[in-house]
Image: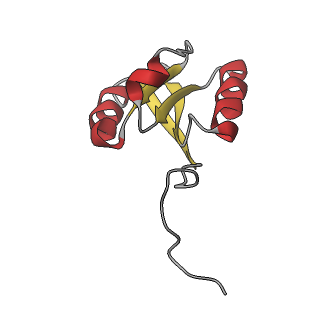
Amino acid sequence: MTFLKEYVIVSGASGFIGKHLLEALKKSGISVVAITRDVIKNNSNALANVRWCSWDNIELLVEELSIDSALIGIIHLATEYGHKTSSLINIE
């Protein structure tokens, strides 16, 4: 019997909470597909268990990983906070 490697997808992985989560996942031995706006910048902070990608190439990477890995979860941490975006609602 062969065991597949386990991985999770994390959006917002380069944010404050995301960075801490990546460290915790590294310690637990789970691999990560980390979605970010700036792949080049984050690849310089490479962790052994992390593959950085953008939303544009997530499907290709997941397809590639599905050959010998099992997706066990998706963790959504992405936000527009701090990126000069306007609120969807105006609160008075």
What residue is drawn where x is 67% and y is 27%?
A: 25
Q: Residue at 69% of width from left, 40% of height from top?
A: 17
- Expressed as whole percent of the image width and height from the top left, the position of residue 16 reads 68, 38
Residue 67 is left or right of residue 48, and the answer is left
User: Where 21 falls versus 89 (above or below)?
Assistant: above
- The relative height of residue 14 versus residue 83 in the rendered view (above or below) is above
Query: Where does the image place residue 52, in percent across and percent down from the top left?
Result: 44, 27
Judge from the rendering whether residue 16 lies leftward or rightward of residue 5; answer left or right: right
Q: Residue furthest bottom?
A: 92
Residue sitting at 56 percent across and 44 percent down? 73
Count all numbered tags in the image, as a single digit: 0
Image point (67%, 87%), residue name: 92
Instruction: In this rendered view, identify the residue nearer to me: 85 or 69.
Output: 85
**Residue 54 drawn at (x, y percent):** 36, 37
**Colour mapping used in the image:** secondary structure
Of residue 23 and residue 30, the one placed in the foreground of this image is: 23
Who is closer to the viewer here, 37 or 29? Answer: 37
In the displayed structure image, the side of residue 28 where residue 55 appears, left or right: left
In the rendered structure, the answer to whether residue 58 lies left or right of residue 79 reads left
Quadrant hosting residue 38: top left
Q: Of residues 47 and 31, which is closer to you in this image?
A: 47
